[in-house]
Image (tube, helix red, strand yellow):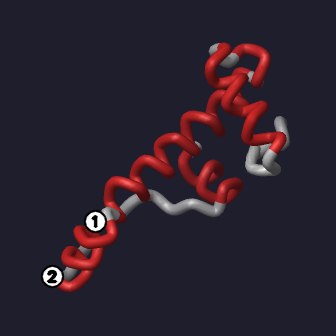
Amino acid sequence: MRQAFEEAMGLKEFKPATTPLEALIDKVTDYPNSAWAQYVTGFLGWVTITHWGLEEAPFAFQKDFAEKAKKGLAFYPKKG
């Protein structure tokens, strides 16, 4: 499931820095928090839509999805 999500969304699982320089850059840019949040939020949305369908999602998710769709930011995966 994770591989299908990453291929569909173009996101890769967050990996922590491996060198002191990478760690410093991540700390200054707040990358770990933003990258992890993007990955987890994207995964939850993808799973909701591809496995249960938007109509079964909580109302708050449906509302957020509709707002993103108006801006062209919503992801509509293909089922099947």
CA distance separating discs 1 and 2: 11 Å
Q: Amino acid at mark 2?
A: Pro
Q: In this orientation, does residue 20 appear?
A: yes
Q: Amino acid at mark 1?
A: Pro
Vertical order, 18 against 72 (above or below): below
Residue 59: where, in percent of width, then height? Answer: 67, 14
Question: What label does residue 75 carry, if any?
Answer: none
Q: Quadrant of the N terminus?
A: top right
The furthest residue to the bottom: 21
Q: Is residue 11 left or right of residue 8?
A: left
- Residue at disc 2, secondary structure: helix
At a point 26% along the width and 72% down the height, the residue shown is 28
Q: Find residue 18 and report its image quarter.
A: bottom left
- Residue at disc 1, secondary structure: loop
Residue 38: where, in percent of width, then height? Answer: 50, 51
Q: Find residue 64 and report its image quarter.
A: top right
Q: In this orientation, does residue 77 appear?
A: no
Vertical order, 22 against 48 (above or below): below
Residue 77: where, in percent of width, then height? Answer: 79, 43
Instruction: Please name whichever residue, 68 or 35, is drawn nearer the observer in this view of the structure.
Output: 68
At a point 57% along the width and 44% down the height, the residue shown is 42
Q: Quadrant of the C terminus?
A: top right
Instruction: Please name whichever residue, 43 or 74, is drawn nearer the observer in this view of the structure.
Output: 74
Mark 1 nearby-residue class (10 Å; few <14, some 14–19, many ≥20) = few
Q: Is residue 14 left or right of residue 62?
A: left
At a point 71% along the width and 24% down the height, the residue shown is 63
Q: Which residue is mark 1?
A: 16
Mark 2 nearby-residue class (10 Å; few <14, some 14–19, many ≥20) = few
Vertical order, 30 against 60 (above or below): below
Q: Which residue is mark 2?
A: 20
